[in-house]
Image: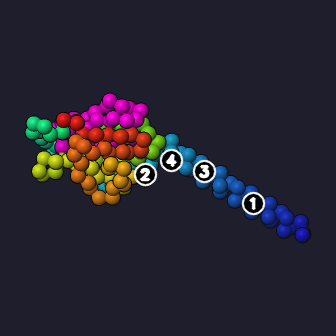
Amino acid sequence: MSAIAVTLLKVLFLALLWAFVLSCAGVIKTDLFGRTVPASELPRDLDNPKKRRRRRIKRGAPRRLSIIEGQQKGISADLSDGTIQIGRSADCQIILDDDYVSTRHARVLADDNGGWYVEDLQSTNGTYVNGQRITVPTTITLADTVRIGRTQLKLEA
């Protein structure tokens, strides 16, 4: 092989190696610092606290969502606001320190009949109710267990 061809292969290999290194650096930067979320992707109900209204909770109805398994066992959030956001973001009501949890992973909402349902917010690893992965908003009761990452949550009266 000629010297020019060998030099050309060396330069091409070096360029590919640098492209790989820069790609890895970009992924590491995104993992460490996150990505910028445009205002259009922010949930509307968290932007305006005046829109939140406290719900009257009936006797025997769930009053809080508690972590029953995981690193943060015992932490709970009050259900009186009608919405609980779960994830790693600081604007979530339940902040989970788990590598398998997305920034805004799931949301627990009240329905019009006094019940509760959980909705997955297009998370990478999914949300599970009683061991089944959910893709649509799913009704939950006091008997149901919600799993997000390695953490299990349950409604409590």
* Residue 72 on the magenta segment: yes
How dense is the environment of label 3, judged by Cα within 10 Å: few (below 14), some, or many (20 and up)?
Answer: few
| Residue that appears at 41% across and 44% down | 149
How dense is the environment of label 1, judged by Cα within 10 Å: few (below 14), some, or many (20 and up)?
Answer: few
| Rendered image: mark on residue 125 | 2
* Circle 3 or circle 2, nearest the eye: 2
Q: Position of residue 134 (x, y in %)?
A: 33, 55
Which residue in the structure is indicated by mark 4? 30
* Residue 18 on the magenta segment: no
How far is the residue under mark 4 from the one under mark 1?
26 Å
Which residue in the structure is indicated by mark 1? 13
Q: Position of residue 30 (x, y in %)?
A: 50, 47
Sequence order check: which comes first, mark 4 or mark 2? 4
Closer to us: 24 or 141? 141
| Rendered image: mark on residue 24 | 3
Sequence order check: which comes first, mark 2 or mark 1? 1
The residue segment tinted magenta is: 63-89
How far is the residue under mark 2 from the one under mark 1?
36 Å
